[in-house]
Image (cartoon, helix red, strand yellow):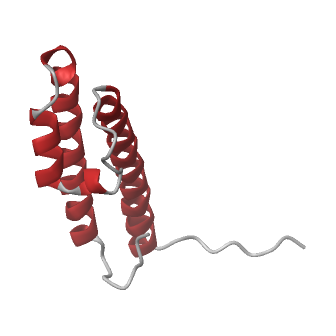
Amino acid sequence: ELPLVRIPDEYEERARFILSEYEFWSKNRTRAINRLHSIIANSGVTTVTKKEMCSCKKRKSLVDNIKEGIKSAAVRLEDEITKSGKILKDLENSLPNKNIQIS
């Protein structure tokens, strides 16, 4: 006899969709932070940690001090990190049940 498979209700489907999108944007933000950290390290600033890159103020000040040849790429990445952070906040607020843990 085959096991019973429960079909997810509308609430569960919505939560799964939101969590899947959250995971996508979280990975995207992490990738952009790692890339920006690499650009900053290659430009000669080796004392900055990836954790410090999560701070919007710190990122902006670091990007402002990058030499012109690679500054445009750093600016785009900084914008992408900021945008991803806003999307993640929106997704957290759109969860149907605030008891769902996002990690």
**Which quadrant holds residue 16?**
bottom left
In depth, the one of 3 and 71 nearer the eye is: 71
Residue ID at (37%, 33%): 38
Which residue is most to the right? 1
Residue 82 in picture, x, y percent from top left: 18, 48
**Which quadrant holds residue 13?**
bottom left
Residue ID at (30%, 72%): 95
Residue ID at (15%, 35%): 63
**Which quadrant holds residue 23?**
bottom left
In the picture shown, does residue 65 fall above or below 13?
above
Can you say which quadrant of the picture contains the N terminus?
bottom right
Looking at the rendered structure, the number of numbered marks drawn on it comes to 0
In depth, the one of 2 and 36 nearer the eye is: 36
Which residue is most to the bottom? 99
Residue 89 in picture, x, y percent from top left: 22, 63
In depth, the one of 56 and 15 nearer the eye is: 56
Is 4 on the left or on the right of 6, as rendered?
right
Residue ID at (25%, 48%): 84
In depth, the one of 72 and 44 nearer the eye is: 44
